[in-house]
Amino acid sequence: MRIWKRRQKTPSGETGQEALYLKSLSERQVPVQIKLRDGEVVSGWIEYFDDMMLRLTREGKPNLFIYKSQIRTITESVAQGLKRSGNREEPVAAR
């Protein structure tokens, strides 16, 4: 008599958290630093993203479309105390 074991599927590695995090960064226009696989670091805020790429909007510099496969890390910038409002940054009121 053979006992058949069900094969368990391996996790897909996708939790959906990436999209939620990028959406949050985009909606709040949080300044970020993106480190690319080649070591270059670019700064700005994420205006748009999809499954394959994102658009980084930068002050006084050309905007960038970056393939996600070329991104090593995304870090919220040190300027956490600043909130974008239109085309300028304003201090966030203390709570």
Image (cartoon, rainbow, N blue to C red):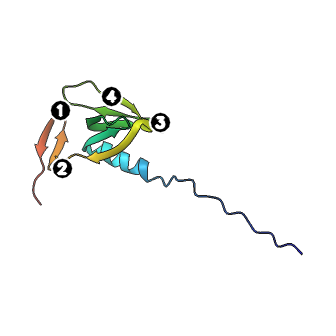
The correct choice, above or below, for 7 with respect to 47 in the image is below
Q: Residue at x 33, y 28 (%)?
A: 64
The residue that disc 2 covers is 80
Which one is in front, 73 or 26? Answer: 73
Cβ atoms under marks 2 and 3 closer than 8 Å:
no
Residue beneath label 4, please? 64
What residue is pinned by disc 1? 87
SS for callout 1: loop
Sequence-first disc among 1 and 3: 3
Residue ID for mark 3:
52
Q: Quadrant of the N terminus?
A: bottom right
Between the C-alphas of marks 4 and 1, the distance is 17 Å
Alpha carbon distance from label 1 to label 3? 27 Å
Q: Are marks 2 and 4 in contact (CB under 8 Å)?
A: no
Q: Callout 3 environment at 10 Å: few (<14), some (14 to 19), or many (20+)?
A: few
Q: CA distance from mark 1 to mark 2?
A: 17 Å
Count residues near mark 2 (Cα–Cα under 10 Å), then give few for <14, some for 14-19, many for 20+.
few
Q: Amino acid at mark 4?
A: Leu
Marks 1 and 3 close (CB-CB < 8 Å): no
Above or below 24: residue 49: above
Q: Position of residue 4 (x, y in %)?
A: 80, 69
